Image (tube, rainbow, N blue to C red):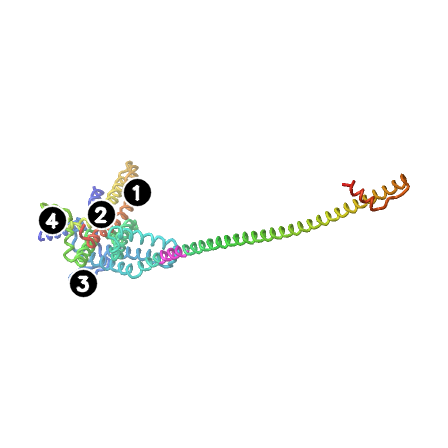
Amino acid sequence: MTEFLLLLSASAEAAEKGGLPQLDASTYPSQLFWLAVTFLTLYLAMQFVFLPRLGGIIEERRNRIADDLDQAAEFKREAEEAEISYNKALADARAKANAIAAETRAEIDGQIKAEQAQMDTQLASRLAEAEDRINAMKQSANEKVDEAAADTTKALMEALVGTAPDDRAINDVIAKVAP
Amino acid sequence: MPFLMTMLSGPMEQFEIMQIIPVHLGAYDISFTNSSLWMVIGVAAVSLFMFMATRRLSLVPGKMQSAGETLYIFIADMLRGAAGKEGMKFFPYIFTLFMFILASNLLGLWPSIPGTPAKWHTFTPTSHLIVTLALAMVTFTLVVVYGFYKNGLGFLKLFVPAGVPWWLMWLIPVIEVVSFLSRPISLAIRLFANMLAGHLIFKIFAGFVASLLAAGAWGVIAILPLLGNFAVYLLEILVAFLQAYVFAILSCIYINDAIHPSH
């Protein structure tokens, strides 16, 4: 300790002769005092004014960005939900359209079948009618043939033998001959 | 011969403390000196910068606010990286320390106005050991007080690193204590010596320029020390930043010891 003081006093002497000003202990109280005053002033200004303001705005920006990101995520989720419900609605509509189409098709098929069946029966009945008519005409034609044959036979017999046989005999013969 | 005399006595003159306003407090001379003046100018400059940076705060920052925020985040990341989240309670101290030292170092590089009296010349408060030692002692005291306050006697674990073999237990704590006690001294001397050396080199090179110019025909080569000074000036700007950073980050690392003593 005494050596240190000796060194200090020696350096103080040296300072007077132009030695190291840094070792001139007589300036220490002033340097320490003003260092304390200025450093403490700056410290208090930093602690209570500048740093809270700067830190506050940085924090605020960080929160704002985090909020915005949250909101963006929320919007994205909503958009995804909307897409899902849109797809669902689309699928529903498509299914419904298919169902309606199938129903309509079945209905039309039914109609066509019914009309076809009706047409078939109509045609069948008309065919039967026509056949009946043809049969009737055939029969009447046959009768006419028989009649003509009888007439012809009567006329021939009259011409050949001079007497006409009676109708009943002629008809019996014709009925025997004709198939 | 006279120029040699100025050269020999010259380089230290720039560090002389000169009274501007004499003040006495009891037995102590606490005069306002050139050193005090440049401390005040440094604090004023830092405050002006911080005022400009925080004047119109907005979510989309302007130039000054951007600069302030960059600095804020730089120091905050440094402290958080060294001392963890818990270290953030010392953020205002570390920030003030960094800015104070940086302002002192940088403003000391400002050229003096030629022709003004010596006491108005530019001065670097951090080129005085007592100032850097006082700043280092603040950090040191903070570490010791907070270390014991937070950990109690557990703070002493700092001097007994884990995994030391039993037969070294008498030696390692001694080394640890010595290294712990030498921290403020190394902190103080590193900053002081860097500032001292830089300004000495300026003055010596400037002395070369002056004496070579006075030497007649050889005056042409005075350009060499002048260019040398220019290079040293650029280097010193870097050193001003670097030493402020080193002082601040070492303080952060020491504070980490107070928070987490078992390393």
**Mark 1, residue position:** B230
Q: Residues within 10 Å of mark 4 (few under 14, many from 20)?
A: few
Whether residue B115 is visible here, answered yes or no, is: no
Task: Inspect the image, locate mark 2, and give the three-letter code of the amino acid beneath it.
Answer: Leu
Task: Inspect the image, locate mark 3, and give the three-letter code of the amino acid beneath it.
Answer: Leu
Q: Alpha carbon of mark 1 to alpha carbon of mark 3: how far?
A: 43 Å
Q: Look at discs 2 and 4 and give the one toward the viewer.
A: 4
Label 4: which secondary element: helix
Label 1 resides on the chain identified as B
Q: Alpha carbon of mark 4 to alpha carbon of mark 3: how far?
A: 41 Å
Question: Position of B70 compared to A31: left or right?
Answer: right
> Do marks 3 and 2 both belong to one polypeptide chain?
yes
Label 2: which secondary element: helix
Q: Residues within 10 Å of mark 3 (few under 14, many from 20)?
A: few
Label 1: which secondary element: helix
Q: Give the mark, 2 or 4, whose residue is nearer the N terminus.
A: 4
Q: Give the mark, 4 or 1, whose residue is nearer the N terminus.
A: 4
Which label sits on residue B46? Answer: none
**Mark 4, residue position:** B174
Q: Are marks 3 and 2 in contact (CB under 8 Å)?
A: no
What residue range appears in magenta?
Answer: A60-71
Question: Position of A88 compared to A23: left or right?
Answer: right
Q: Are marks 2 and 4 in contact (CB under 8 Å)?
A: no
**Mark 2, residue position:** B196
